């Protein structure tokens, strides 16, 4: 909608994780460093946790892109699977054929043969599970049993778990203490501070192709930080709405009032207590401005 107006080639604040927009926040770089170090030393279980919207899936994809060629990867993005479904998903990722009636014993035999074959090629196998807090209890136990496959010197299968803080709560249950004891490396993602929000917004605009004067000044970014608590996903939502509002008024830069309107129109953003009564009124105003922007974009006349 506003690409031509700002002279950019693509939308800079989409919610789809895109490694081209990886900013390299200190927390993200530290997490990747921990993961690469742990995987190279052959550890069994590695865990990365973070609140919703902190960039776990982006780091997951970044890791998949940066793993050396001596690793074979299996990636499961939606792990709400029964033990049977989980085993079949892992087998599929590793190109292991199973019959329709394969039981755990047959799976174990075939997957072990495949892992040994990969090991003989001097390669390691990494199973990466995103949204791991969604794993059912029985499937977590099945996952633990998979990692029992090992040689005298190292594990044949390493597992990286990405999840929300609920994953820590689940792993704290007594019945999962065996798996928890196998997690040798873990990392918790941090939120952005106000300066990182400022640099993050500039970075995404630059990657999208913007070359003009500063669109989001520090006052705008201060508002973005307070409303988002430094959560990248919420910052993206607010920036996108702010750009649309500024575009709807024909402005070349985003003003603090545009950010304020975007905040009041976003449920996930934190409103100052004194402003909550005006939220509905401002939401209506935002809708009207965005509609005007769309009409302007289409070249229609009211």
Image (cartoon, grey):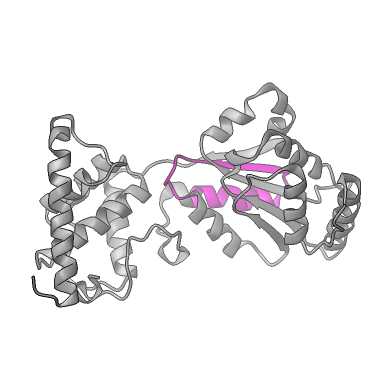
Q: Residue at 91% of width from left, 46% of height from top?
A: 105
In this view, 118 is above or below 40: below
The magenta span reads 29-55
- For image coordinates 66% across by 37% down, the residue present is 136
32 relative to 185 in the view: left or right: left
Q: Is residue 203 visible?
A: yes
- How many discs mark residues in the rendered view? 0
Where is residue 206 drawn, in percent x and y? 30, 68
Can you say which quadrant of the picture contains the N terminus?
A: bottom left
Residue drawn at x 81%, y 48% is 154
Picture coordinates of residue 231, whole percent (x, y): 36, 45
Looking at the image, residue 290 sits to the left or right of residue 301; the answer is right
Residue at the extreme top: 174
Confirm whether the magenta stretch covers residue 50: yes
Near-viewer residue (64 or 25): 64
Residue 173 rendering spot, x and y as whole percentages: 65, 24
Q: Quadrant of the C terminus?
A: bottom left
Front in this rendered view, residue 173 or 284: 284
Dividing the picture into quarters, in which one does residue 23 lie? bottom left
Q: Residue at x 41, y 52 (%)?
A: 25
Left or right of 19, for residue 223:
left
User: Eyeballing the image, is 239 above or below 143?
Assistant: below
Is 88 inside the magenta-drawn segment?
Answer: no
Instruction: Name the residue nearer the viewer: 252 or 268.
Output: 268
Give residue 30's position: percent from left, percent from top. 50, 48
Look at the picture and state if 28 lies above or below 121: above
Q: Is residue 254 visible?
A: no
């Amino acid at each position: 909608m506003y690409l031509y107006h700002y002279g950019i080639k693509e939308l800079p604040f989409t919610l789809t994780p895109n490694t081209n927009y990886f900013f390299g926040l200190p927390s993200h770089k530290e997490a990747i460093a921990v993961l690469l170090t742990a995987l190279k030393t052959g550890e069994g279980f590695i865990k990365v946790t973070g609140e919703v919207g902190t960039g776990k899936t982006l780091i997951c994809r970044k890791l998949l892109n940066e793993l050396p060629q001596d690793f074979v990867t299996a990636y499961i993005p939606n792990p709400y699977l029964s033990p049977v479904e989980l085993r079949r998903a892992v087998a599929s990722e590793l190109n292991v054929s199973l019959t329709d009636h394969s039981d755990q014993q047959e799976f174990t035999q075939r997957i072990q043969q495949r892992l040994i074959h990969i090991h003989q090629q001097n390669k390691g196998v990494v199973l990466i599970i995103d949204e791991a807090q969604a794993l059912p209890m029985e499937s977590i136990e099945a996952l633990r049993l998979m990692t029992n496959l090992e040689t005298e010197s190292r594990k044949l299968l390493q597992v990286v778990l990405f999840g929300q803080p609920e994953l820590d709560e689940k792993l704290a249950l007594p019945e999962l203490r065996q798996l928890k004891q196998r997690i040798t490396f873990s990392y918790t993602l941090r939120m952005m501070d106000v300066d990182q929000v400022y640099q993050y917004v500039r970075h995404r605009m630059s990657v999208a192709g913007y070359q003009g004067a500063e669109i989001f000044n520090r006052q705008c970014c201060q508002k973005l930080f307070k409303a988002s608590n430094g959560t990248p996903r919420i910052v993206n939502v607010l920036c996108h709405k702010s750009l649309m509002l500024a575009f709807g008024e024909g402005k070349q830069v985003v003003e603090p009032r545009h950010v304020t309107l975007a905040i009041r129109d976003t449920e996930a953003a934190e409103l100052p207590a004194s402003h909550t009564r005006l939220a509905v009124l401002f939401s209506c105003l935002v809708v009207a401005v965005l509609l005007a922007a769309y009409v302007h974009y289409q070249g229609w006349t009211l």
